[in-house]
Image (tube, helix red, strand yellow):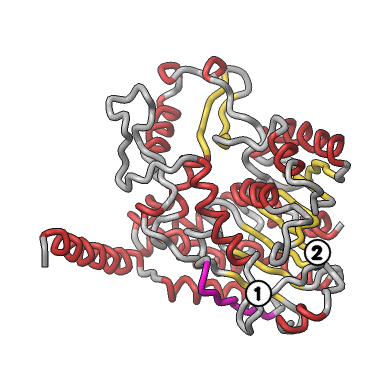
Amino acid sequence: MNNFDKALNQFSKMASTSRLLRQWWSASDSKLLAQSESRLLDSLVKHTHVRKKFNIGGLNILEFNKAPTAAADIKINQPAHPTIILTHGFGSGLGFFYRNINDLLQSEKVSRVICIDWLGMGGSDRPPCWESPVRSLFHSSSSTLSNGFSLCNSRFTPSRAIDFFLDPMEQVLQHDNSNEDGLYFHPNEKICLVGHSLGGYLAARFAMRNNNKSNGSGAINISKLILASPVGFQPPPPPGQRLPFSNLPPAMRLLDALWSANFTPQQIIRLMGDKRGKRMVERALRGRIPHLSPSDVELLGEYFYHITVAPPSGEYAMNSLLEPAVASEGGAGVYARESLGGGIMTEMLSQNGESSIQSVKVLFGDRDWMSFNQSAAVKEMKEIQSKMGIDANVHVLSGAGHHLYLDNADAFVRHVLD
């Protein structure tokens, strides 16, 4: 065995020991995560689900039906109603849509509901950090370490970070998975793609890459796109319109330093361990979504804890895709490094020929911290309507914050179905 093989073997042993210590400290692993997901959905969703299995992609995908639908049936007969695909936001998981699945299926306007965890989040595979969308701590051209440095040393550009999430989703949704355990989409089956928060941004990017009617066999037919409280429409303020670092209050300087170092909220929970971590997660749920019942908090809290302390991976997208900034006028916000606004979404949707998309909706809550994106979203929807003739609108849900699919579940479901 040469020196390189010895070093690699030693590193593998250290990584294995680190994983076992983390599992002991957090009292969590992939089996417990899957069990907590099943308990949440079995208890609060009356329709049964089937976990889809793939040899590609590494995604955790659940399909909900009123009755099991064989892939062979869909292949022969086009479903009478659209399929809804739900994708979650940063640090979340498909289980957070538990309040919406029953109402969607009971409407008689939906053939099935498919929930997907993004790669590196929820119950999906968690690639190790050197394969995850990490942005270097020192990435400025003026830095003395101009080559960049981070603990994982990936230095993902925003485009590479987007590919990290979209490539496996494209592999799964556009692959012929017509075996008994996989997914299958009829060539003429209409798809409604829904994304929340960061998932809304990624869903928009997915639709911008996969909306051409002439994409050929295997391409899914996205007919409706719904972005729920999405990040990314408001372009980042240019350097001349930002408060300089020296003028930021101490709390914002600390946030900027932690963001640059890619220190994520999940890492705090991991450091707290089992009991304190679970208490912190439940406290966060009660604070963000105060109307949840005690039983919902217990089930959702257990699930949220396990997806939070799972091995870090997709969460590193935080500073690859997004950046915080304090504008001289308008205050603080979190912006996409590659914006959807300013005509970008319109251009991308229209550049590949005739689009399959017939409708785009952007939803915000009336007390939504992401609503600083609203004016830019309205401009973009008007441009889409004008240039593409697509029904594109922005709607505000009453009594709802950022988690509008839970805060006003009835209105959210109505907008998905309309």
Q: Position of residue 410 (x, y in %)?
A: 79, 59
Amino acid type, label 1: Leu
Q: Quadrant of the C terminus?
A: bottom right
Splitting the image into 4 quarters, where does residue 6 fall?
bottom left
In the image: residue 388, left or right of residue 112: right
Residues 302 and 50: in front is: 50
Splitting the image into 4 quarters, where does residue 113 fall?
bottom right
In the image: residue 303, left or right of residue 134: right
Examine the rendered structure and indicate whether residue 412 appears above or below residue 252: below
Q: Residue at x 55, y 69 (%)?
A: 60
* Mark 1 surroundings within 10 Å by alpha-carbon count, few (fewer than 14), some (14 through 19), many (20 or more): many
Q: Residue at x 71, y 78 (%)?
A: 46
Splitting the image into 4 quarters, where does residue 224 fall?
bottom right
Q: Residue at x 67, y 61 (%)?
A: 86
Residue on which disc 2 sits: 190
Q: Position of residue 193 (x, y in %)?
A: 72, 57
Inspect the magenta stretch and tell me whether residue 51 lies in it.
yes
Residue on which disc 1 sits: 183
